[in-house]
Amino acid sequence: MEDTFPNTSSSEEISHVSFDAKSFAVRIKENQLTLSRAREDYKHERNCCDVTIRLPRVQQQQAGGSGVGGGGECTVKAHSVILAAYSNYFHGAFTCPLVEKQTKVVTLSHQWNEADLLTILDMIYGGSFELNQDNVFDVLYLADYLLVEHVTAICLEYIKSHLTIEQALELWKVAKRSANAPLIKIAKEFSLRKFSKLVKNRNSGLYDLNSKQLLSIIRQDDLKIRNERTILDCVYDWAVSGQTRESGSRFEDPNFCKLVWQGVRLGRLTRNPTCNCCSFATNRVADSCKCFDIGKVCPLHEPSFEDYPMLNTHVQSCSDCKNSLERLSNQQTFQEFPTNAWKQDPVSSMWYKPRTSYETVVAVGGWNDNSPTATMQIYNPQANSWIKIAGDERSARAYHGLVELNGLLYCVGGFNGTERLNTLLCLDNKTLQWIEKSPMHEKRCYVSVVSLKGFIYAIGGHDGTTRLKTVERYEACSNQWTRMPSMSLVRSDACATTKDGRIYVIGGFDGDSVHNAVEVFDPDDQTWTFAASLSSPRSGVRAISCKGKLCVIGGFNGERRLKTIEILDEQKCVWELQDGCMSVARSNFGIEVFGKYVAVFGGYDDERRQTTAACEVFCFAEGAWFPIAPMPITAGCSALAVVTIKKMNAHFDFVPRSSAESEKSR
């Protein structure tokens, strides 16, 4: 076994196993009658079997429908037409000028288990079969050897859906030894996404790795962690939990210093454990913590390892570590961070390099420069940075809805500058192109949209003539919209969010007045009821559920735009104003949750009387708002739609296409 795990980049990602279903179906259809008869014969008498498969194993478990041949060989009977249709291995054996074509006897060169072969044959013949933790890998390896692609795909999907924390790293090592690319991909993605759980689970095998293996993992850009302190804790726990054969203490391992200074991105530790400041906090008063940027060490808490006694002792006694610590301390004290200095100072540059985020915030469309835009803006919370992707102008819109359903983005309704829309667009994750789906029954801009229990709900809005209280629901598998019970009140420019399996529709405008009323829809009973009203009316408002709390933010009260936040006290059935206010009074902005923060993006700035690019986050622990990186689109935008996708990676899924577009623009 090699000492390191593979470090694949986005350009080297391995595709999932797949097979040509269309050509496969044609082959089967042409021989449908023959296949049907062969299946019946295989299940019962097997009188028409014309192929013998020999397994060169001495000890075999007896299985129904096959016997044990002489000389320690186990034989299984089957039909050549069936095997050739499903297996490229057998198809080649029976069509090429090989001895198997004449004798119809196939001797497998490896020692496979008869039970696994029979499982594959049952899957081929359409009979009942069982995959479990005990046999799935053996079945996979045999199916891969026999080139039975659809069985291989089924096994891989089973492994992917049943993989556990305790199995992931061992699978990664086994897959690497056998050079099984699909298994490596499954194990790697699982381990990196679940790394925080690997750290906490002492049975995960993480602390049994050698130093080179651990370093190859923690150096990965796409580790899913919220704080680099998780990595530092992991390195320390690994060092104190075992010994090496050569030097005894893991602190004396030749690669231990690399684990600390090349594995841990020390410049992106969010804070000292005793500091309660928000990761995004800036410009604090002099006697408080000053976190100059997301993920940067606070200069009032100079980097040290006092919370890690044995590591601190090692650093003080190691000249290389002392030099690295002094360099890091100077950078933090004087706020002189290396920029674009990878070749000149690779180690120091890595201290500040952000890891990629598995929480990707996608902002689509909006009102910009007096017209709707088709631009997509992608925010990486881990790096506090944006990328901008130009969209097809035919999909330009504002005052629309955007939701995620089954890993796909759906854009609902809106206004394209000329007419109100009833269209539904779905984003192709591979091409980043919008695909049109079944349209709604009614045109809707200023629409409120949510996804819940596998459905998309479009609520209220304006059809160009009338403000609406109607509701319709979209089912992706049938690509159909269905009318649902209407709200009690007419609402456009309201907002909707979900909590505890119900839909909350809040505020809005009916053509005469701005609402403070809240209606709740129960999808099981398909009934609407009123809930506690807001403390002030709001349209162009946004609401979201975070940390078990239902939050309503900003909006227009009929006279001015607001910067306040209200949270529902469910026990008292009242909305309570919070002390913290946004820096910008805004309406028609984007809102999303990532990590422990509620974030707002863009919108219409009441003071400046124009769209804004300003973004900020609300930290519940401090009850305060903090600015984050502004949107990259010139002059910002309002009436945009924003959603967080947890299954897409801002670096892998969007950066390559953004870079390609930048090259084209040049």
Image (tube, rainbow, N blue to C red):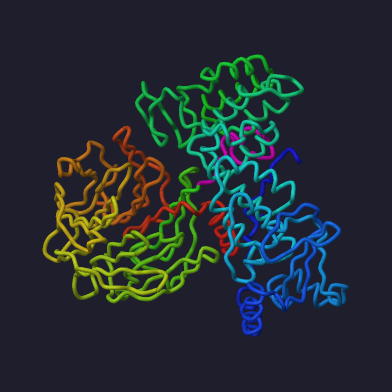
Q: In which quadrant of the rendered image does the N terminus lie?
A: top right
> Is 49 placed above or below 661 here?
below
**Left or right position of 650 against 551:** right
**Left or right position of 248 against 102:** left
User: In the depicted view, which residue is nearer to us: 599 or 47?
Assistant: 47
Q: In which quadrant of the rendered image does the C terminus lie?
A: bottom right
Residue 133 image position (x, y, % from top left): 59, 50
Residue shown at 57%/56% (left/top)?
158
User: In the depicted view, which residue is nearer to us: 101 or 246?
Assistant: 101
Residue shown at 23%/59% (left/top)?
522
Residue 440 image position (x, y, % from top left): 32, 74
Farthest left residue?
A: 512
Residue shown at 61%/27% (left/top)?
238
**Left or right position of 470 against 619:** left
| Quadrant in the rendering for residue 484 | bottom left
Which is the main secondary structure of the residues drawn in magenta?
A: loop
Question: What segment carries the magenta color?
Answer: 338-357
Residue 381 image position (x, y, % from top left): 46, 45
> Is 529 placed above or below 415 here?
above
User: In the depicted view, which residue is nearer to us: 107 or 70?
Assistant: 70
Q: Is residue 3 magenta?
A: no
Q: Does the magenta stretch include residue 354?
A: yes
| Quadrant in the rendering for residue 168 | top right
